[in-house]
Amino acid sequence: MTSQSPAPAAELTGRISGGPSELLHDEVLAPQFRFESRHLLHHYVAIEKTLAAEYARMGLLDADEAHAVAALLDGVGPDTLSARPDANMSDIAFAIERHVETGLGRPVVRWHVDRSRNDLQACAQLMFGRERLIGFAGALAELAEVVVGLAERTRELPMPGYTHFQAAQIITPGFHLTALSEHLLHTQRRLLAAYDGIDACPLGAGAMAGQELPWDRVRMARLLGFDRPQSNALTAVASRRWSAEATAELSLLGAALSRFTTDLLSWGGSEYGFIELPDELSGISSAMPQKKNYPVLERVRGRTAHLTAFHADVLLGQRNTPFCNLVEVSKEAGTHVLAAFDSAHGTVRLLTEVLRRLTFRAQRMREVCEREFLGGFSLANALTLTEGVPWRTAQVIAGKYIVRAVGAGAPPHPGLPGLLVEAAAEHAVALTDPAGLLADAFDVRRGLERLVSQGSARPEAVAEALRVQREEYARVRAAWERRAAAVRAGAAETDRALGLTAAADSAEGAVRADEGDR
């Protein structure tokens, strides 16, 4: 093959006479080119190889031509392309085209006939979104594994649970963490649903109305690892709903993680003292030597706010625009999608490490449970169920007893039976075993043991919930693997069709190995 000098940018079109201005290049096109070279280029290459395979199927390229084009595409990388206003209008699609044309020994006349950048760019961007979803799902799975493990280890440690910022009932860290795990599992399912909803290939839509050659869009979708082609050509090039849906899920997750992190911040405060982090995850005060701070938790919670901002940015960039292919929607509105995924990934990584290294202070948590009258609800229940006191009256008696016991400076356990008898007598109630009622209601261990409903904080119920969650996590993990394997299998099939057998066989072997592991 002989090399050719790239043609001037004006020869890319007959509509304008020159390339972009220096300002347009520096401010818009070059930054976009750098971003796409780093994050989307391998998707552009995969798409171009799929197109070459389709040209060969339609008889527009012979086998040698298709192979030559594909081989040159395989040589494309960030270091082989550059944004040149004079040669490629600082556009990555034109840069790839020029790279291949320059490398061919002779013109391949029909290559890129009946093609548009619109569906090319839409497809590359969507493949980028799928890739980031798969990657983030992996980070979320790692967090879930740590959460489930910590929940299992702490499901029998009593701690106070709070409502309205007041000590309410006895729970365990494991119970609380199981709730976090349940939310992570829900997010995984939502991300899978989002992935499946957007797993429709835009390629073959053309500029907006379809194409004039008989492209096999089902085959192209399969070769690129998609479940199906996008059924409407206009939707294929105009919609960037995937970016709004993906960032919406990240925003919802961020809101939930901010709440759980707020609990950790509270538990780590000196008034609670329920948790401790190692020194390497802690901070100090420059002025107050007694302090050990946990700013990493503030970082985690603070970062979750960005996720909502990124989602709002995507929505605002898309609203009030016409439904067609637009740079405003396809590029400007998606400016911070990568930042959204990176921020979510970093937030999850930090929280994963925090929970991996976190220690619950069992004695301190028990002391607070023993100090607070957390069995008040149980006392009212017992008054009704064992003494026959009407429920609302039982609530009044229990409340009066607690007020008087606090006033007398009495601890919750074993309590002062005389005060309970006195409170009950004011409502014409004679108790048969006031001491037994108090001893049982305010016993810390009994606070967990008496919980019998499904989904409760009882350690056995938490263990069962964790068992179910582990099974569901395994199903979700397998579902993500199947989707990732479909992408690898499509790439391998494309390479085989183009005669790139070594790469195809290697990729196919990796797919089979992954399936065997599952």
Image (cartoon, rainbow, N blue to C red):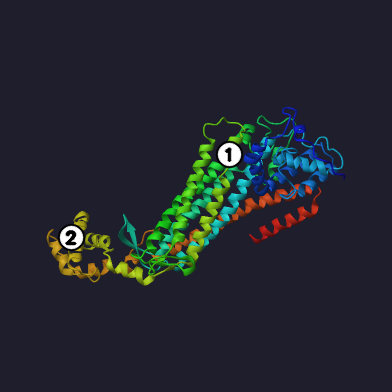
Kind of residue at badge 2: Lys
Q: Quadrant of residue 475?
A: bottom right
Look at the numbered disc 1 and give the secondary structure of its residue: helix
Q: Is residue 159 left or right of residue 313?
A: left
Question: Foreground mark, 1 or 2?
Answer: 1
Q: Secondary structure at mark 2?
A: helix
Query: Quarter of the image containing the C terminus?
Result: bottom right
Q: Considering depth in this image, is 434 or 508 the residue closer to the camera?
A: 508
Q: Return the residue at label 2.
A: 400
Which residue shows up at 49% across the image and 48% down it? 307
Residue for point 54% across, 56% down: 346
Q: Is residue 48 visible?
A: yes
The image shows residue 30, relative to residue 213, as above or below, that is below
On residue 332, the disc is: 1
Residue 97: x and y in percent read: 76, 40
Question: For this view, does 93 lie left or right of residue 284?
Answer: right
Quarter assignment of residue 235:
top right
Please state the horizontal and vertical placement of residue 466, each as a whole percent of the image.
47, 61
* Local crowd size for mark 1, using a 10 Å CA cut-off: few (<14), some (14–19), many (≥20): some
Determine whether label 1 and label 2 are within 8 Å by CB. Answer: no
Horizontally, is 444 left or right of 319 in the view? left
Q: Quadrant of residue 68?
A: top right
Q: Which circle's residue, 1 or 2, is located before the other in the chain?
A: 1
Task: Describe residue 339's horizontal placement relative to residue 517 as left or right.
Answer: left
Which amino acid, by three-letter code, is at mark 1?
Answer: Glu
In what quadrant of the picture does the N terminus appear? top right
